[in-house]
Amino acid sequence: MPTPSDAKSPPSALIQVRGACPHDCPDTCALLTTVDEHGVATRVQGNPDHRHTDGALCAKVSKYTERSYHPERVLTPLKRIGPKGSGQFAPVTWDDALAHIAQRLQSIAARAPEAVLPYSYAGTMGMVQGESMDRRFFHKLGASQLDRTICASAGAEALTQTLGGKVGMKVEFFAESQLILIWGSNSIGSNLHFWRYAQQAKRSGAKLVCIDPRKSETADKCQEHIQLRPGTDAALALALMHELIVHDWLDHDYIARHTLGWEQLRERALQWPPERAAEVCGIPQEQIRQLAQDYGTTKPAAIRLNYGMQRVRGGGNAVRAVACLPALTGAWRHRAGGVLLSSSGQFPAQRAVLQRPDLMPAKTPRTINMSTIGDDLLREASPTFGPKVEAIVVYNSNPVAVAPDSSKVVQGFAREDLFTVVLEHFRTDTADYADYILPATTQLEHWDIHLSYGHTDVLLNRPAIAPQGQARSNAQIFRDLAARMGFTEPCFADSDEALCRQAFSNAVDYALLESQGFATLALPDAPFAEGNFPSPSGKCEFYSARLAAQGLDGLPDHLPNYELQGSDARYPLAMISAPARNFLNSTFVNVTSLRNIEGRPILEIHPDDAEARGIANDAVVRVFNDRGSYLCHATVSRRARPGVVNGLGIWWRKLGLNGTNVNELTSQALTDLGRAPTFYDCLVEVEACNTPAAAQATT
């Protein structure tokens, strides 16, 4: 197999192909892939002509050739020949694999089509390889639908109930802000290009405040770090509202004209003086008062949210509370003011055209939540659940590693009667349990089109190299399966490039995408300066009648964690499982250069908590609760606040010290809004591990 060279700059004879980063990150970078005369990609770099990318890539994606040409890449269809989970496979032809898969799916669908379940998420964020032909296939089959909640749905629902959709300020105008609250985000590791705008603002005199239970790399670079307890963000936001009210740091005109439910919210906020919030959050009262003064008196002020804060019981309410703040101060009047969690709702995507929900049977199939897959794969048939899941097709995801309560997920995938097909680049933890592994193309090898949740540009990805081995694109695999299943609708013949054109129809200039690789949406610089929110009322809805109609609280409030610190003496430590800087969820874990930088699975623990448990730096520790236990190395560090440990993830289980990862400990409990997982709502205990197994794990 050819390997990429170490070329630093491409000779003029080489070609550069425009593309887009496919990974689950707000930045959605524009890529340039250099290809030599032999058709080998020698370098992937950021496109300097794309203002948000500005020629720079994160350490992960700059190693993309190492991933595409990885020696362990799956390059032929594989059929299981050993026990599930053993990783024993033999090569088969595409014809044999497709014929057997189609036969099994047809047999199951003839009895109970809902017994077939797709399982996918954001292994690629592309609209073609992530949510087009696959959806058409499963809609036509009548398979169960998947509630794709594992990352962002609590925050998304909160924005929808408050602002009307996943909308916000433009990321480039953070560079002009005078105060930036970076709330629940380690931007240096997970939102690099926003961080560049924030640094521009800082150089111009702006104050940067990081609000995060972990003293992250981003917190190190901000003027202030507010290290609150996990799951207490709504309490802090309500206390800020309290101070804005009592000191009259409010924009009364904006509130009167462009908000709904002010009197009710005012009454709620006045119940949250700084003293109360300080006790809940575990931070000094004065820190809350100063933050409120800064936010209420600095113009323009901006808030960059990320999804970490919504991975607790009250995560939806927390996002709602924070999303209310800019309307109270009139921050939306300025293009450098407001809030940004996601911009994806601003794109005119033609999802119904891509996904064809009209292909579904008249009776809409059931929906299964991907965050409860551990329980759902173990359920028997019942009138309330429906048929037992008999087949699962996994693509763009690695649920055995990333889904919560992973011991149950493993039990489910280990069922001998569960027919499992996995589309993959590598033999991941999930692929080890497959009956068939089908080799998928990487981003360098296929067409795709991308929107972003961190900026407002559409990007086109062209294939830079031929598919490696026998790899096929996700869309091609589902086209091939559709043909084998006898699906004759013309939409199943659409090519990948045709699907790219359908994604936005005439709403985006496709010729511009072809010529420069990206196109910027024509949107106002300050979209909500005069209200015009995409909510039912056209206003920022402090009070949501839609939530009230569901029997929920129409106002944002603080909801304590399910696993509240101090509620169980057996497990006195709260744990958050923040991302390891050099991985993206479970992607890149097997890229040797990145794994070497990351080192090994670690748990950050505060010196006081380590001393109380006799734990030395770099010792092997056992982290455990009622759901399971996990071995890793302790890093004694003030990055962890007292009483909170940080289990950095997400390592592949089989690369862990005892064949598990941090999700052995997380639960399947769901958030208040959006039916999302509560990864950061987790109590544990930690002990020094001096067992023979631990000693062997360190060698």
Image: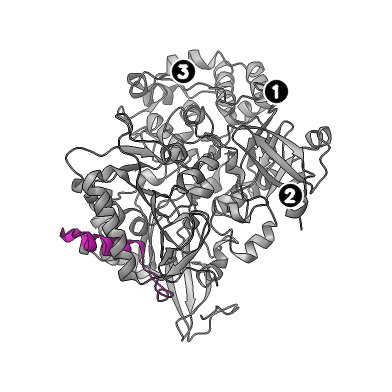
Of callouts 3 and 2, the N-terminal one? 3
The location of residue 226, given as percent across then percent down, is 67, 33
Note whether 115 is above or below 459 in the view shown.
above
Residue drawn at (30%, 62%), measured in percent from left and top?
100
The answer to whether any part of residue 304 appears in the image is no
Q: Nearer the viewer, mark 3 or mark 2?
A: 2
Residue type, label 2: Ala
The answer to whether any part of residue 313 appears in the image is yes
Corner quadrant of residue 39: bottom left
Does 488 lie within the magenta span?
yes
Which residue is label 3 attached to?
Answer: 265
For label 1, the SS is: loop
Of callouts 3 and 1, the N-terminal one? 3
The location of residue 512, given as percent across then percent down, is 32, 65
Residue drawn at (52%, 62%), measured in percent from left and top?
54
Residue drawn at (76%, 58%), measured in percent from left and top?
699
Q: How far apart in space, not on screen, are marks 3 and 1 (Cα)? A: 36 Å
Q: Nearer the viewer, mark 2 or mark 1?
A: 2
Which residue is label 2 attached to?
Answer: 693
Residue type, label 3: Leu
For label 2, the SS is: helix
Which residue is label 1 attached to?
Answer: 569
